[in-house]
Image (tube, rainbow, N blue to C red):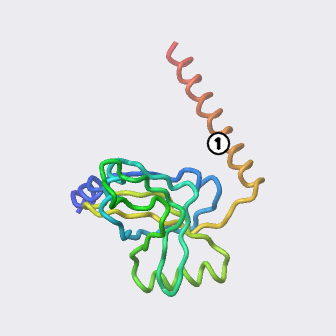
Amino acid sequence: MAQNAAKAQSDIKNIAENRKARHDYFVEETYEAGIALQGTEVKSLRAGRVNLRDGYAHIVNGEVFLENVHISPYEQASRFNHEPLRKRKLLMHKGEILRLFSEVREKGYTLVPLRLYFKQGRAKVELGLAKGKKSYDKRDDIATRDVQREIARAMRGKNRNDLD
């Protein structure tokens, strides 16, 4: 069983990560969704030419769409290239979509793409069900991170002094 988990982990190839999302939002839950892509988009993803920073997902008529995610045009493609900022349909189970729709509508959550990756040769996106942070929340996170860094630095210094 542990071998299967290790093999499944090795089948995942990260393409892009939205680190700013965890800074700007409290991520409550994450969901995995497939993406309906054109051929040139897949080639651009394999080259790592994607930007998730301003992306978001929304639900329309029981379907989930990914918006504002920039996948650069594939340079070797001819006139059949894709539009970089087009809407892309996400592939999820109906029950998951209905649950997400109720969370977004009633509780004011946002669907944010956290990372893009290939899993067993298929492009996937990890969506986060998130609530926006206020500026003071961001300052608290920065202060906590600084304190942790100082503690780690002090511990490293203490360990060096013990060896002398």
Q: What residue lies at 48% left-to-right and 77% top-to-bottom?
A: 64
Q: State the image coordinates of residue 8 (x, y, percent, origin top left).
A: 27, 59
Q: State the image coordinates of residue 83 (x, y, percent, origin top left).
A: 44, 61
Q: What residue lies at 63% left-to-right and 82% top-to-bottom?
A: 105
Seen from this angle, which residue lies furthest top?
Answer: 164
Seen from this angle, which residue lies furthest front?
Answer: 79
Q: State the image coordinates of residue 18 (x, y, percent, origin top left).
A: 52, 53
Q: Residues within 10 Å of mark 1 (few under 14, many from 20)?
A: few
User: Is 96 located above or below residue 120 in the figure?
Assistant: below
Callout 1: SS: helix
Q: Is residue 139 left or right of residue 24?
A: right
Q: Quadrant of residue 38?
A: bottom left
Q: Is residue 7 left or right of residue 70?
A: left
User: Is 153 located above or below residue 137 in the figure?
Assistant: above
Q: What residue lies at 32% left-to-right and 58% top-to-bottom?
A: 40
- Could you say which is closer to the camera, residue 162 or residue 109? 109
Q: Amino acid type of disc 1?
A: Arg
Give the total number of marks visible in the rendering: 1
- Could you say which is closer to the camera, residue 124 or residue 46? 46
User: Is 144 located above or below residue 130 in the figure?
Assistant: above
Q: Quadrant of residue 152?
A: top right
Q: What residue lies at 49% left-to-right and 52% top-to-bottom?
A: 51
Say which quadrant the N terminus sits in: bottom left
Q: Which residue is mark 1?
A: 145
Q: Is residue 127 left or right of residue 36?
A: right
